[in-house]
Image (tube, grey):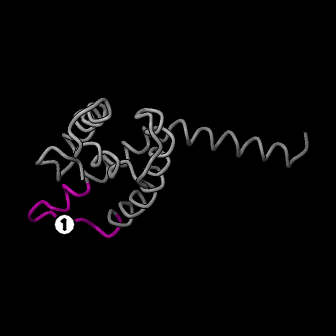
Amino acid sequence: MNVFEITLWTEFLLFALLIISSPLELLLHFWGLMNYARARDLPGAGVTKASTLCAMYFLIRGYLLDFIVNVVWMTVYLGEFPKELTVTARLNRHAATGSGKRFDRCQRIQDLFLKFFDTKYADGVHR
């Protein structure tokens, strides 16, 4: 094997690792950003510029992970091709229908992973 083949296989393995770990990474990014939003909204508790820069990094990286999870994992989980770019938009679309197996699966995701951490979950829909 030459250097080019080794580099190519390394890139392939890193991409496969990104695809496999993307749901967990997306969830951890979401929880971190919701914790930042909660700290930012507390009265009398300011956030530093460094924490804001870290939050911006997590937000940008989170959008990339959101797209990957929507295209790969949610397509398999819900059994349909995506019509939206993000998981959030897809969850909201299925939550608006109010019936069927996709609605039940979306409700399960919202109840298990998003409900207790989302600061805007008052009406039961992740936004």
Residue sitting at the far bottom: 49
| Image quarter of residue 15 | top right
What is the tally of numbered marks visible in this picture?
A: 1
Relative image position of residue 35 (x, y in whole percent): 24, 51
Q: Is residue 23 left or right of residue 104?
A: right
| Image quarter of residue 74 | top left
Residue sitting at the far right: 2
Residue 41 painted magenta? yes
Q: Is residue 95 left or right of residue 67?
A: left
Q: Residues within 10 Å of mark 1 (few under 14, many from 20)?
A: few
Relative image position of residue 37 (x, y in whole percent): 23, 58
**Residue toward you, 15 or 93:** 93
- Residue range highlighted in magenta: 36-50
**Up-down: is 113 above or below 60?**
above
Residue 60 painted magenta? no
Q: Secondary structure at mark 1?
A: loop
Relative image position of residue 51 (x, y in whole percent): 33, 62
Relative image position of residue 14 (x, y in whole percent): 64, 43
Which quadrant: the N terminus?
top right
Residue depicted at 44% across the width and 43% down the height: 25
Residue depicted at 29% across the width and 37% down the height: 106
Q: Which amino acid type is marked by label 1?
A: Gly
Q: Which residue is mark 1?
A: 46
Residue depicted at 87% across the width and 47% down the height: 3
Residue depicted at 19% across the width and 55% down the height: 38
